[in-house]
Amino acid sequence: MADAAVEFLLSNLKEVVEHHAHLIRHAKGNIANLERDLEVFKAFLKDTAKMRKNDEQIKLMWKEIHDVVYEVEDVIDFYVLKANEESQQNTLMRLVKGRTKFLHSVGRKVEAISKRVQDMREAITSVHKDEKGIHEKPQARPPRLSDVVGFEDVTEELIRRLLQETDYFDVISLIGMFGLGKTTLAWKIFNDPRITLEFPTRIWLPVSEQFTDKEIFLRILKHLTTLDDEICSRDPSDLASEIAYRLQSGRFLIVMDDVWSEDDWNRLRPALPPKHTNPRGKVLVTSRHEDVGKAASKPRSFSTLRFFEPEESWELFRLEALGTLECPPQLVKVGQTIANNCDGLPLAIVVIGGILFKSLHANVETTKEEWKKVSEHVSSYIDGEDKTNRMQKFISLSYENLPHHLRHCFLYLGLFPEDYEISASKLIRMWIGEGFIKLKKDYNSLEEVGQKYLKDLISRNLVKSVKFKPDGSVKTCQIHDVLGDFCRKEAATENFLQEIKYNNEGVYVPPSSNKCRRLSIHSNWQYYMSSNLPASHIRSFVCFSDTNHVLPPQESTNLIKAFKLLRVFDVQPLQLELVIREFYNLVHLRYIAMSFTMETLPSYFNKLWNIQTLIINTPSPTLQVEADIWKMKHLRHFKTKASAKLPNPTNSSNTTDELQTLSFISVESCTKELPVRARYLKKLGIRGKLGPLFRGEVGSFNSLRNMEHLRKLKLLGDGELEVGKPNYLPGSDHFPSGLTSLTLCSTFLSWIHISTLGSLDTLKVLKLKERAFIGHTWEVKDGGFRSLQFLHIEQTDLAFWEASSRHYPKLRSLVLKNCEKLCEVPVDFADIPTLQMLELHTCFLAVKSAIEIKKLKTEAGGSEVTLSIFPPPRNE
């Protein structure tokens, strides 16, 4: 990964020179020399990329370059940090000059290595001329013909067992080694039309190697009821009993994916109905271990997943490597050789296919030559290796063929816990904060480039998309646990990242090196903080604790003082009582996601000049923002669940072209100056008493019409309905002209006013939550909601919904939650050609009509409708 490190450091140096020239004026000459030598490193690494595995001398040089690049990066970042502190304190510049001297000494080391690199590069120039790259510019993978290839016999047998009537509660187990495709097959079954029709309540439950009983039980329970503070405060045994009680009747299917041990199964079992109750409920368990299958399915036998047959391997290979079953005759022989050498492991075929798909050329003979090169690599992994080691080498081969700009992004996924569902927007913002993403030609923003990077990793089968936004973009993603293990192991060898945790024996595993760049703590963070381990090199510190913890002042002081060069600081489970002044010296911070008990965002945050993403959690309903966010020239996303009262703009305040997200702000902060201050804003959330805003008494809702780039708007009302004052929406011409997504929450509007929203021609997503509209009847007017694709209605007293298919001609998804009085979903919705998904949660009266809609769509032979019903219907 030395090539990626050099590329990153070069970009970092250029950024330092561009934005912080006043801090490096004593070191400009040193930095210029460093840039020159780093360009030499970059050229050498590019020349020898294919040669280092078989040449010990080149391999050692790569390591030496990697180590010195990290050292230079540390020196540069420390230099900027100290120069900033000293410039603020107006101290003598001798300390800065001392740093310059240190920078100069490191520069001499770099220069010495650079001379040796140049000599070595000249010696291998002739060899390099004959080398050709294995991958081309990434291209988008076309839609696959099928989500799952092969295992048709296993699929039908498992579906048969799930649909089979029994006189007891049945648990079916699917056992097989990693890489065989257990999860993929279970997901296919989970979404099979026969299963969705039979089990309107379906719960997908990934089970990681390390989990807490409470965390897993809450994940199940959130599908069965609305979680509140009382439920979340219960102990695990009470939660298990509550789940078992709720599952004693009705049809449901729970898939428990990747249960690691019999002990883990025994911890999960109390949350399920007793063996001789509710024969209509089913559980499908996947695991690598036979003892899990024996314990879960007894007295019945478990199912064992076999390896792929040769014809299945060849079919999957063609889909992954070519995107189609059509294969040019010239590629058949070499393609079959590669497929067969994957030894029946679907994951191996998928990983290798991801490499080959990137080497497709218009010229078939050129593609054939590229495939032969890969075939030679694959063949070299076959002899003397068991399937486990072979799979790791396949993944290594895929990693080695990643473009350098994707390597950091891929390894960064090792920070997240096993089976963690990763927010795509969060991941991309963290990548941006780390500096992994640079703006490219033909892209409007760093976020767009990041989305492209994520799509590339997905198309290479290194990341799996899990959920999608209404516009079709990836909402959440996951990484296979085998790939995650690879990321962590590879990253640890490079000092790139380290997970801090307890091992299976309960023993604390410290970082393998005190030069590790990124730390992730999933549990037991207190032990780490009390150990006083060195953290001076850390660039990312993230915490994924299952529960929240309040940090007293001394512990928060220890936490912050442990780091100097942080870029990413995500510790939302840790609630700080105090933010100490030393925190504001961390000028390299770009991504902050933190929780504190304060009701004010101090003005000191202005000192963090590099900040790009700022996420603040506070238990207070309001947040007084004393920091002048308009002076944060790199700020792109500001988010808080509180109602943030922004500072009044001053003459010295700047306009920002970077700010894209602002949510939530107070009603008073929605001023006529907002479109001027944040002219490129894409997402806006407003929280407070919205009635006065709508009526023009406070703020200026009318000014939003001037925000031509605004696409998402969220309006969250605070407090009960204002007695004696009518609540109504502003006219449709007051809304941004390009608005595509609108969320209303606790606005207490009458359904007669919703026609205003139907007039928004560009609106595709509409979410109505927590009594956004009140009243028993919604009569939809003709001509409305012509572009709407996603409709979400939650917690309403609506009883009669008078509408037809012509009112929602493009509707794809309908989600109804806690609409207990709703008599039915308009059955005419079965005639909407685009309808794909119906989800009902605690809508007991409307269940019958939803089932009827699915039935009518199926009988009509059109597109299938996925139907989800929670809790399970009691009357069959």
Image (cartoon, helix red, strand yellow):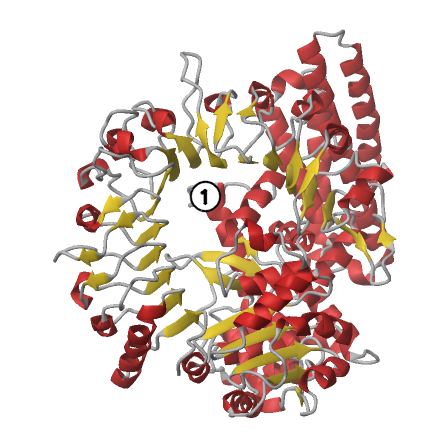
> In this image, 273 relative to 107: left or right?
left
- Where is residue 348 drawn, in percent x and y? 66, 75
Residue 662 lies in what quarter of the image? top left
Residue pictured at 49% horizontal, 73% vertical: 202
Q: Position of residue 535 (x, y in %)?
A: 79, 36
- Taking 671 as reference, is 72 above or below it? below
- Residue at label 1? 441
Can the viewer see residue 43 in this picture? yes
Nearest the viewer among 169 and 652 is 169
Residue 802: image location, x then y, percent: 18, 63
For the point 12% across and 58% down, the residue is 782
Residue 825 vs 618, above or below: the answer is: below
Image location (x, y in percent) of residue 476:
52, 57
The quadrant the C terminus occupies is bottom left
- Name the residue nearer the viewer: 379 or 675: 675
Query: Against 479, is 453 above or below?
Result: above
